[in-house]
Amino acid sequence: MGVHYENLDDRLRGFVLTESVSGHPYTKSVAQPLSKAGILHSPEQFRAFLEHAPIGIAIAQCDDFCFVLVNRTFCQLVGYSEAELLTLNCQDITHPEDLSTEQPLAEALINGDIDTYQLDKRFLRADGSYFWGHLTTAAVRDERGRLLYVSGMVLDITERRHHQELLSAQMAELERLQQLKDDFLSAVSHELRTPLTNMRLALHMLDQPGSNKNQSTYMELLKHECKRELELVNDLLDLQRLESCGIEPQWCNLSLQQCLNKIAGGFVSRLEAQNQRLSIELPADLPLVRVDRAWLERIIAELLTNACKYAPPGSLIAVRILRRSNHQVQIAVGNDGPTIADESLPYLFDKFYRVPKEDLQFKSGTGLGLALVRGMVERMGGTICVESHSNWTEFTVTLPMANIL
């Protein structure tokens, strides 16, 4: 296909595009009248203007949108040669997901409802990749208003689009963090205020005449709420230090069997009181783990506490030790009880998160236990996950084995 330009009458001050297709030339107008100063007064200057334009320029037929003219920048953007592009149409280099967006605009342009439109869309390159481009499309009509060609200018906005998406993601994250902060402050305020209110009530009652007969009751209330307040403050401080990396594990090589037996012994009376059964499965060749002893004991105790708290009377609580590989050991703590909804599982380790179910809302606790557990596990190079189905909920902690030389 050969492409060249011929001058029109001076009154039009435009150009005619002549194409030779199978030896049959035809002509169509492709440019608006030139300025009075005659800046582009020759085909060579017009071609030079197109070739050196810093944005992609293309002209397509109005019936099938096949390209009849493209400049160098447009070829570079889409990765095709000029000869290759002249065998393609606009749809061939448009991302399939963006075709439906542009189609009504293109139809409105052809029907004469609009003369131009702009949109951001993805252009397919020859290698199969794509880039984001800002497209400005305009109708080229003759003196009678008949549509001759469709012209387009494309500016590569991939980097700008990336920055916009990054900014949108950052804004969404800021909104999420703002909501977390608000929820955190609300929960902290409630958790701090409740014990203080109870202590104030107990002190008020102790100050009343004739309170001697109930003095022991009020003192027990004071002790309980004071302990609760202290636990909350300590948990908050521990969590803050974990999240800011202000505390390091005190490493040791520990026997899981001794650790588990010690912790399980502290739950015997509670299990008997709640008519719950405890099952511990330990392999014969149980390896040592490299952990912080105090942290691991606290992790297992917290998981067992939650299991006892949310398991109904007569249910089973199971602790299993699994050798995952030659380098890792898994500790699984599970219990019978209500199944936790899938949408709640990802948030169980968030500070003060409560499963949105009425019978769980009134369980006591600071709401920081699982957040602390995750922080300690991760600081020791491990992971923790949870599964809940068929009335069985199980937390699994994966920890590194000790390297024994």
Image (cartoon, rainbow, N blue to C red):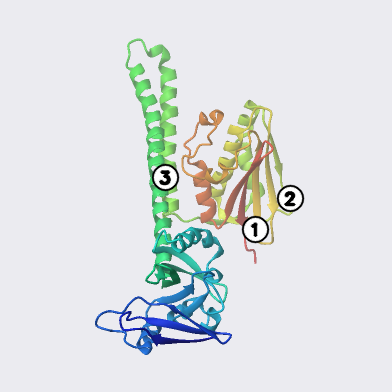
Q: Count neighbours of disc 3 (C-alpha within 10 A) and say few if under 14, some if 14 to 19, many if 20 or more.
A: some
Which one is earlier in the sequence, the residue at label 3 or at label 2?
Answer: 3
In the visual, does 358 lie left or right of 234? right
* Amino acid bearing label 1: Gln
Residue at the spot x=51%, y=51% of the render? 376
Residue depth check, mark 3 versus mark 1: number of the one nearer the observer: 3
Tell me the residue that label 3 is attached to.
180
Residue at the spot x=44%, y=18% of the render? 217
* Amino acid bearing label 3: Leu
Secondary structure under tag 3 reads helix
- Where's residue 5, x and y in %? 42, 86
Residue depth check, mark 3 versus mark 2: number of the one nearer the observer: 3
The CA span between labels 2 and 1 is: 14 Å
Residue 54, numbered circle: none
Q: Count neighbours of disc 1 (C-alpha within 10 A) and say few if under 14, some if 14 to 19, many if 20 or more.
A: some
Q: Count neighbours of disc 2 (C-alpha within 10 A) and say few if under 14, some if 14 to 19, many if 20 or more.
A: few
Tell me the residue that label 1 is attached to.
328
* Amino acid bearing label 2: Pro
- Between 198 and 29, the one lying in front of the other is 29
- Where's residue 393, x and y in %? 64, 40
- Between 144 and 327, the one lying in front of the other is 144
In the visual, does 285 lie left or right of 116? right
Q: Eyeballing the image, is 270 above or below 65?
A: above
Q: Hey, which quadrant is residue 156 in on the image?
A: bottom left
Residue 283, numbered circle: 2
Secondary structure under tag 1 reads strand
